[in-house]
Amino acid sequence: MLGAQGEELAARFLEAAGMRIIERNWRCRYGELDLIARDREVTAFVEVKTRTGLGYGTPAESVTFTKQQRIRRLALTWLVEQEGSWRHIRFDVVGVLLRRGYRPVIEHLEGVF
């Protein structure tokens, strides 16, 4: 539930910033990509991390090197399945902090890995 809420908030945030969501929760046998979006000529693979506190660091800090490598492999799988050319891609992270009694805090980090 928490993850789904964070992903919905992240998608709305990105759309408000002018990005177009192409896919949500794209799955294959190797895993899942949270969001795939277009930002003008760039295809962005977006990992969304949602937390209710900062006890373990910021949401974005939880995207480890191992997780980054998995997302890259999943992105390649997605790209191979698509038609057309995908010359410009990037990997983004959206951190969503949901604390009871406070407004959500959303941080979009572009091209972070």
Image: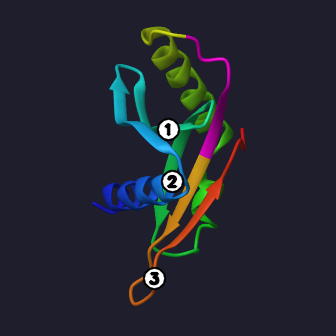
Q: Which badge, 3 or 1, comes first in the chain's sequence?
A: 1
Which residue has dot 3 on it? 103
Q: Are marks 3 and 2 in contact (CB under 8 Å)?
A: no
Which of the two residues, 101 or 22, is positioned nearer the viewer here? 22
Dot 2 falls on a residue whose secondary structure is helix
How was the colour assigned to the protein in this rendering? rainbow
Q: Secondary structure at mark 1?
A: strand
The quadrant where residue 27 appears:
top left
State the extent of the magenta-drawn residues as a range. 85-92
Residue 87 part of the magenta segment: yes
- Is disc 2 surrounded by few (<14), some (14 to 19) or many (20+) residues within 10 Å? some
**Residue drawn at (54%, 51%) of the image:** 18
Three-letter residue code for mark 2: Leu
Estimate how packed mark 1 is, as few (under 14), some (14 to 19) or many (20 or more) residues with alpha carbons within 10 Å: many
Q: Assess whether residue 53 is covered by the magenta stretch.
A: no
Q: Which residue is mark 2?
A: 14
Query: Which of the two marks, 3 or 2, is nearer to us in this view?
Result: 2
| Element carrying mark 3 | loop
Q: Is residue 37 above or below residue 5?
A: above
Mark before the other along the chain sequence, 2 or 1: 2
Q: Earlier in the sequence, mark 3 or mark 2?
A: 2
Q: CA distance from mark 3 to mark 1?
A: 25 Å
- Callout 2 touching callout 1 (CB < 8 Å): yes
